[in-house]
């Protein structure tokens, strides 16, 4: 037979203790779950950079680093083959237009010039002989015309005399002789007219032959001019007043037609080639004012060209210098450019936090009034310059935010500042 045992109740104080422990455990879990993350993160104030929200006119500027480059750069080339015989101006030399830069040599070209000159002299001599011969033929034909004219006039005179005698009734001339002289007059007239036509054709033939011969001589003269110019091009001269930027040639080096021999840059005319980050290039436009800083002086400029290609995260912007060229200006001189994009009147702005982007939503750490704690705060940015950024929403005048790098503790909602 089974015996039923009765459960003994725990003392009331033990039940209260267990309930209290459960409540405390639950409260601790809730506290750990809902408390602000990162409340135990402490940051040294000396490692922080902060900025206060200001209100007023915001000058939106974009900064870029670059170098000065010559505005007008030209390569000197040659249209002949040759060997570098002498280098007169090396890299860095100042030259004026027409100054000798280097001399090339080409014996075959010089010999070709002499032979071409000889051929031209021969053609000119032949042209003179041909002209004399053709003029002599014209003179012979003119003589034939005169002779035919005289024969015609002589026979016509005889005919007229016979006609006079016959009209007077004198029968000194037979009818046969009279008819014969008529035929002779007609023949002489035709012969005279024919010789005149032959003379005209002879003159046309002379003109055509002289024209063909002149064309041959002129062609040889052009050939001589071309060869002479090629020989002249063996002396390489400066095309502008400039500085020799590069001289890649060496003595004795063989060069081919079309090869670049020296690079010239026009003096005292420069442009600035700035590198602008691609995230800011959308605000840059042609015609905007630029202030260039050479570390020794400042000069005004204007945006002239924006490269359509992004290279290594940056875009090249060419700036034309509008003010006087600084005395220290030289190619590859490092300069800093500040491009004035726009000015916004009466707006809120703050020093630009690291990694903040214009026209975007983000968050900042807002420092409390005591400067002991900072909490995450959502903001909406407007236009951004290199150093400042516009605040559209999220902050008010006078509030202080952290602008230095927050990547080490950005996952925490709050931080303590020591």
Image (tube, rainbow, N blue to C red):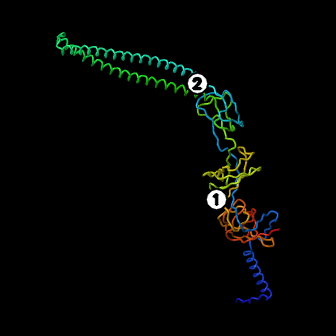
Q: Position of residue 301 (x, y in %)?
A: 68, 52
User: Label for residue 154?
Assistant: none
Residue located farthest toward the top when viewing the structure as drawn: 172
Q: Sort mark 2 into few (<14), some (14-19) or many (20+) by Cα contacts within 10 Å.
A: some
> Residue 245 is drawn in which quadrant?
top right
Give the quadrant of the N terminus: bottom right
Left/right placement of residue 12 relative to residue 169 reads: right
- What kind of element bears circle 2? helix
Task: Give me the residue at 72% from left, 60% from top.
Answer: 387
Q: How many marks?
A: 2
Give the quadrant of the C terminus: bottom right
Q: Position of residue 257 (x, y in %)?
A: 58, 31
Residue at the disc numbered 2: 109
Task: Give me the residue at 54% from left, 19% from top.
Answer: 118
Residue closest to the eye, 418 or 174: 174
Q: Sort mark 1 into few (<14), some (14-19) or many (20+) by Cα contacts within 10 Å.
A: some
Residue closest to the eye, 323 or 334: 323
Left/right placement of residue 215 relative to residue 306 reads: left
> Residue 93 is drawn in which quadrant?
top right
The residues tagged by marks 1 and 2 sit, at their Cα atoms, a distance apart of 58 Å
* Residue 360 higher or lower than 168, as above or below: below
* Residue 137 higher or lower than 414, as above or below: above
Q: Position of residue 115 (x, y in %)?
A: 55, 20
Residue closest to the eye, 367 or 299: 299
- In the rendered structure, which disc, 1 or 2, sits on the residue that comes first in sequence? 2
Q: Position of residue 250 (x, y in %)?
A: 68, 31
Task: Give me the residue at 46% from left, 16% from top.
Answer: 129
Residue at the disc numbered 1: 283
- What kind of element bears circle 1? helix
Left/right placement of residue 360 relative to residue 407 reads: left
Left/right placement of residue 275 relative to residue 161 reads: right
Residue closest to the eye, 52 or 57: 57
């Amino acid at each position: 037979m089974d015996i039923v045992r009765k459960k003994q109740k725990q003392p009331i104080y033990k039940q209260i203790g267990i309930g209290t422990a459960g409540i405390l455990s639950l409260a601790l879990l809730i506290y750990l779950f809902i408390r602000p993350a990162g409340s135990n993160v402490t940051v040294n104030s000396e490692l922080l950079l902060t900025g206060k929200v200001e209100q007023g006119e915001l000058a939106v500027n974009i900064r870029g680093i670059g170098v000065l480059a010559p505005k007008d750069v030209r390569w000197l080339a040659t249209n002949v083959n040759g060997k570098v015989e002498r280098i007169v101006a090396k890299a860095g030399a100042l030259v004026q237009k027409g100054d000798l830069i280097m001399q090339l040599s080409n014996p075959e070209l010089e010999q070709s010039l002499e032979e071409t000159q000889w051929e031209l002299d021969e053609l000119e001599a032949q042209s003179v002989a041909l002209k004399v011969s053709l003029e002599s033929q014209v003179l012979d034909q003119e003589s034939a015309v005169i002779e035919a004219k005289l024969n015609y006039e002589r026979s016509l005179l005889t005919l007229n005399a016979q006609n006079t005698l016959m009209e007077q009734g004198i029968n000194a001339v037979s009818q046969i002789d009279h008819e014969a002289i008529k035929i002779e007059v007609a023949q002489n007239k035709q012969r005279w007219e024919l010789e005149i036509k032959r003379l005209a054709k002879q003159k046309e033939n002379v003109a055509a032959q002289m024209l063909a011969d002149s064309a041959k001589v002129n062609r040889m003269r052009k050939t001589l001019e071309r060869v002479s110019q090629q020989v002249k091009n063996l002396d390489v001269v400066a095309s502008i007043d400039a500085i020799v930027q590069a001289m890649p040639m060496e003595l004795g080096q063989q060069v081919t037609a079309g090869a670049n021999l020296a690079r010239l840059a026009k003096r005292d005319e420069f442009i600035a080639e700035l590198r602008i980050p691609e995230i800011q290039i959308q605000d840059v436009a042609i015609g905007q004012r630029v202030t260039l800083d050479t570390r020794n002086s400042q000069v005004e400029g204007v945006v002239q060209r924006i490269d359509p290609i992004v290279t290594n995260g940056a875009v090249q912007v060419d700036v034309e210098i509008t003010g006087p060229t600084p005395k220290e200006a030289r190619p590859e001189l490092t300069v800093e450019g500040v491009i004035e994009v726009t000015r916004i009147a009466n707006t809120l702005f703050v020093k630009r936090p690291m990694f903040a982007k214009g026209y975007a939503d983000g968050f900042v750490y807002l420092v409390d009034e005591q400067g002991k704690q900072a909490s995450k705060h959502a903001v909406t940015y407007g236009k951004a310059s290199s150093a400042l950024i516009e605040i559209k929403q999220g902050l008010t005048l006078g509030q202080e935010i952290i602008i230095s790098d927050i990547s080490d503790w950005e996952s925490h909602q709050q931080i303590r500042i020591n």
